[in-house]
Image: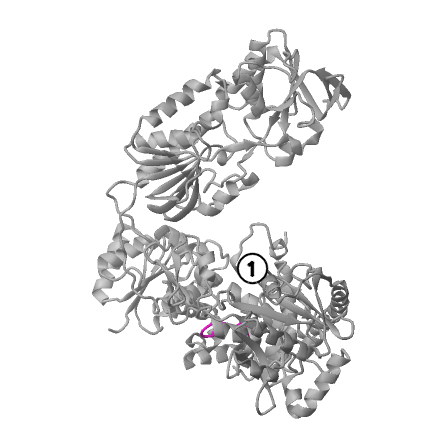
Amino acid sequence: MSKVEGTPITKGAIISTKLNTNESIIEFLKKAMDKKVFDAVLVPVRVPAGDSFAYVLIEDKSLLKDAAPLSPIMSVQGAKAISGMTKLGKGNMKIGAVMRPCEIRATVELTKINQTNLENITLISMDCPGVMPISDFLKDPEKSMKIYEDAVKRSDDKIMRPVCQICDKSSMVSGDLHIGTLGAKKGTFFIVSNSQKGNEVMNKLGIELKDNVDDWRNKVQDVFEEKHKKREKSHKDLKAKTTGLDNLINTFSKCINCHNCMKVCPICYCRLCYFDSDKVKHTSEDYLDQAERKGSIRFLPDTLLFHMGRMMHMSLSCVSCGSCEDACPMSIPVAQIFSMVADETQDLFDYVSGRSLDEPIPLVGYKEDELHEMEDAK
Amino acid sequence: MTMKIGVYICECGPNISEKVDIDKVIDAVSSMSDVAVVDRYKLLCSSDGKKFLEEEIKKHGLTHLVVSACSPKQHEKTFMEVCENAGINPYLFQIVNIREQCAWITEDKDEATEKAIRLTKAAIRRVRYHAPLEKKEIECNTDVLVIGGGIAGIEASLQLVSANRKVYLVEKTQSIGGLLTNFEKTFPDMQPSSALINQKIQSLNNNENIKVFTDSEVEEVLGFFGNFEIKVKKKAEEEPIEFDVGAVVVATGSNIFDPKKTPQYGYGKFDNVINSLEFEKMNLSGKISLKNGKIPKSVAIIHCVGRNEKKYCSEICCMYSLKFVRYLTNKIPDVKVSNFYSDLCLPGKSYQKFYEQTKGNTDFVRSMDVKITEKDGKLNIEYKDETGKKSDLSVDMVILSSAIEPTSDASKLAEIIGMSQGDGGFFAEEHEKLGPVSTSTEGVYVVGSSQDPKSISETMVQSEAAAGEILSSLVPGKKIEPEVKVSHISESLCTGCKTCLSVCSYGVITFNEEKKISVVNEAICRGCGNCAAACPSGAATIKHFTFDQIYQELMEAVK
């Protein structure tokens, strides 16, 4: 269970409603704004053209009607929105941010490396059914909306992105509040709190956290087990296809060096990526040398090195959100490969990215007694 | 100005010339860009060799120098001095180790030559990217922080003040004196412990150059040899006390192993099973007695308690156990004392004699699998003798001679100071023989039983050694040259993640809240490179080990 939740949550509130999940979340936000618990909310909103969704900071309650907490696609990773909003300071507005668990986990990672300031932000997640690949959605946005809604109703993940289909942390609570729909009786949903901040919000809203939430927990555990099994199998298959230099080269040879995967990645937070810097630009004499040595050299060079370098840099914090794969114009299964590697590197340090703010990123910690399996064979 | 690189290959007598075809190396590198001159010499580190190099630099108007010779550990500094004397910046120089790394280890002459060529070419390419670095000199502080007010810390302090140094002595308990204040006598001379320690405390109290902080703990140690910034927190006081020193002596002593971890001895369960320190205190109080107030008629001393658990011999337990025999037989005339031991540790010129003089007053039982039970108010010792035969002995009192272990807060202190802990959690010395009291952090010394279980005499030797090292290296008026190969954080690349702050071993990186970037204090940075290795955005770099320098060197080496 520890992989699903930061801390085991046993109590929460069961709320009765006639509304669907999206509407319930909006109603909750409205109430919180009415009671001045939040001055504004950050939530996905469908763009006027109707063909995408964007994070919008809403201060005018009347605009909440356009919000789509359960948007069918993830066009911008929420952690990037939070970081963009608070990196230079917390500001003086209390903000409620509604995001998917993986977006909150990425936010937690960014907070550990000083790229956000969460002091005035309340992070609210929900049981995530997954999102569609952006390219699928764009084929016919109206039709896609219906397909998505329908799939969510039937708990069918086949239309979701490949990493969503194998996501075993889709109900992980690492923010302040979480809205649970799994295991809820018809016409109800759960709200649980994961922090003092969450408790205070509920207190101000007059909602007591005293209901038993075993039904939600049990269902979450079922989903976790099912998805986890699927994840392991999928990673095993993928590993067979990508292990070894030849397989790696084959997998990434389509790459056109656009670096979109890096640009949309919430964890890639460097001001200037090493692979965009002058450090990877060499004289033609150098390239000739290389061509002479290897017989030939591909241009632009270093595509595989870029992916491996990025993996080295961010896999310990990768939350398997899938943004990179959505952004790849060449349909390379980047997110699946990165999630596979991330699971293994994080396991090495007993670390789960974004699980808790209290777990320092492994890079900054040093233990004398660790990683013996990496030592030379005796 | 155009670049003119001079490349010189040292024959090192026959050392290099026999295994490396130097003419081939000269041929191979002569055509490289900007190489103005390539030559060989029989022994470049000799006075003639140095003179030759200096003249060559001047004659050819060289701007950069590459010397293919021996290990930089041996002669890098020598040739940097030559550069300085000849008027070029010593950092526009690169040494190549073709002796240890080619001539001495490669069997085949052709292979050794090929390797020497590659390494020399790599250095020539690297040196083109070198930048001149300027040496600095800073004043050093000659005051010393001594942590721990036991005999080790007191002795080090007294030695230092006798040479007019100022000492800050920090003791975590309410008074100085340490473990010795619990002992009536010391082995093997059986002289009163109080005479030794009280006299030392007296001289310490009378010296105005020693500032003693009791009830205090060191909270922060930043900086480096010659310039440490210290924060000490006194119990019951809000603000830490801050001062600067040039060196630190760690003398935090030891604890004894808790016999509760070896339940077979019944410690904590049976009243009259006591540990060695409790016995010392009881003896010092003047009355050796059982819990019920009666005088024990028979006492067993169990040796090596915790030895299996700790996995080392604590060195002094045999001797203090013999001292206990003396205490007992002197004070209780008809007492029967039995020692249960597995091996005796009696090294040196005086310990054997002490044993010979004591053994007549006690039984020595070589035993294993000792187990203690209680029967009719008496303690029963079950054991196997040397032959494996089971046996037992009934006694009134059992003293457990516990192993010596580091104090429980040793790890905390190790982290604060940046020292490493070695076997058993004791503070690690730099080298068992070559640096027995220095540590891997320059300017931090370790003495006494925080480094290893130790007798008082061995402790005194170490304390005096550390004081000697400090007195000869931190000299008033002498300036020290700080590292010039230091870190630099690029303002435009730093993204403010603070990763470097947490990995900096010397605490010299601070965060500029206004600009949201990290800033290195280059004056006190030691150039360890942790920040450069950890910085995800490539903002932190180490001078003289820049990306370009390393990349160019590698590219040439693998070409």
Determine the main secondary structure of the stretch shown in magenta: loop
Q: Chain of mark 1?
A: A
Q: Would you place residue B176 above or below residue A112 in this image? A: above
Question: Badge 1, how many Cα within 10 Å: few under 14, some, many 20+?
Answer: some
- Magenta-colored span: A266-273
Whole-percent x, y for residue B249 in the image: 40, 38
Tell me: A184 left or right of A178.
right
Residue placed most toward the observer, B559 or A333: A333
Say if residue B448 shows up in the picture.
Answer: yes
Tell me: B216 left or right of B4.
right
Q: Residue at x 60, y 23 (%)?
A: B344
Direction top: furthest residue:
B333
Whole-percent x, y for residue A333 in the image: 64, 79
Name the residue beneath numbered marker 1.
Answer: A362
Figure quadrant of residue B476: top left
Residue type at tag 1: Pro
Tell me: B107 left or right of B246.
right
Scheme of colours in the image: one colour
Local secondary structure at mark 1: helix
Q: Is residue B44 magenta?
A: no
Say if residue A255 shows up in the picture.
Answer: no
Figure quadrant of residue B393: top right
Whole-percent x, y for residue B35 in the image: 32, 70
Q: Would you place residue A68 above or below residue B440 in this image? A: below
Residue placed most toward the observer, B491 or A220: A220
Q: Residue at x 55, y 10 (%)?
A: B330
Q: Residue at x 61, y 36 (%)?
A: B310
The quarter in which the N terminus of chain B is drawn is bottom left
